[in-house]
Image (cartoon, rainbow, N blue to C red):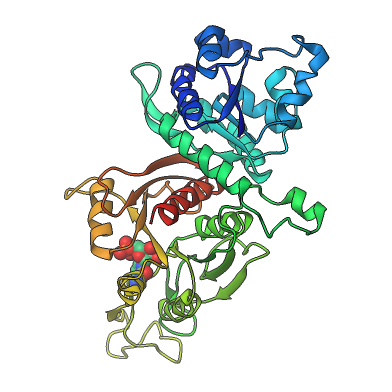
Amino acid sequence: MHVVLGVTGGIAAYKVALLLRLLKESGHDVTVVPTQSALRFVGEPTWAALSGRPVATDVWTDVHDVPHVRIGQSADLVIVAPATADLLAKAAAGLADDLLTNTLLTARCPVVMAPAMHTEMWEHPATQDNVATLSARGVHIVPPASGRLTGADTGPGRLPEPEELFAVCERELARAAAPSDQTAGGDPAAASTADPRADLAGLRVVVTAGGTREPLDPVRFLGNRSSGKQGVALAAAARDRGADVTLVLAHGEVDPPTGVDVVSVSTALELKTATETAVAGADVVIMAAAVADFRPAHYADRKIKKTHDPGDPDAAPTIELVRNPDILAGLVTQRGSTPRPLIVGFAAETGDDTGSVLDLGRAKLERKGCDLLVVNEVGTDKTFGRDDNTVHILRRGQHEPVADLGPAGKDVIAHGILDAVVAAVTTG
Ligand code: C5P
């Protein structure tokens, strides 16, 4: 396969030399297209020696060969790593002022971008908007990892390890090489707008989203602050990646996406019934809903009066609660020893005296027995209702997270979670 490796001007360019080596060792032809700033970090001889090919650095060399068009047209995959904030902005705007941006405009193959930059630059709304635009156009954004940055500072913005980027490239190439029902003989206009990441094609995915409401009387309920945004973003992302999606949707602030089957529910018990029905024959279940752990033991048919005790006008009623079933744990039990469906749970944790957010997540994964657990840190100003999110993904049997994502838009996080789902489905 012919891979174009775009390198932009970030210090993480040095890590990309190893990605080039991995691509070459697995038999790919790689054309490296570094920007001028990238060459200040890692020079042309390194790229030429490792790729075994001349390095294409500008649109004015070998003009007879029309490199600004040919390189993109002939690629089976383009990966840009690291992708700076500047490159993301240019690509989102469709600028073409150097060889790499020209290549991006002419490429019709899958495109992967691995942003890496300082946390402030990554979190800036301009960068996040550009990432959302590129992601909506079908660019596979590999979210940056959290950790040590150039200096002593740490935070999200690190380029993921070369092995991880290599695995993404291999998956994209395998997917692109596989015959796809989606585009074959289909409407070419629809095909050109379809997300090129059809790595969930042929899979049935069930997503639960939103917060349940447990009624107390005809006007009151016990609820929670879930907006449903992350679950809805997951359903939309899974649809874009070719899955047949059922969204079991409780209460929230966002409308369901088009192109998915929606089952509306209100209470935990309704969500349980709907999910158990939807799960039959499903390949993946993602339990993003915030399910109430308790519900009122008694439902009052009539509105509970403020002054319910004639002998004591200031008395307040005591509400007795009963436990709701743990739907996620029930799905794990019901699945037994069969590999399908792959079950993904969510954990909203604040961390406490008994352990960090990750420690609590590990214990929850153990308790629930699901395959992946998406752990997010919550607090009064975090996660609920916001458009961005920060999560760690734990996989059963592995101590360290398989991915640390964000802060990033919930649509980018959704794709990062689906990357982990695809990896888990592929490796069993
Ligand atoms: O135990 P906790 O509520 O923190 O677990 C969260 C995960 O379990 C989420 O995936 C949520 O959808 C699921 N859950 C459930 N049934 C419950 C409570 C939570 O399936 N009663």
Count numbered badges in the picture: 0
Residue at 66% x, 56% y: name it.
180
State the residue lying farthest toward the front: 27
Q: Position of residue 417 (x, y in %)?
A: 46, 50
Q: Position of residue 250 (x, y in %)?
A: 51, 71
Q: Position of residue 270 (x, y in %)?
A: 46, 80
Q: Is residue 367 left or right of residue 113?
A: left
Would you say residue 291 is visible in this rendering?
A: yes
Above or below for 89 versus 197:
above
Q: 312 and 19: which one is in front? A: 19
Q: Within the image, what quadrant is residue 316 found in?
A: bottom left
Q: Is residue 175 left or right of residue 401?
A: right
Q: 285 and 88: which one is in front? A: 285
Q: Position of residue 260 (x, y in %)?
A: 63, 67
Above or below for 329 versus 395:
below
Would you say residue 315 is visible in this rendering?
A: no
Q: 38 and 348: which one is in front? A: 38
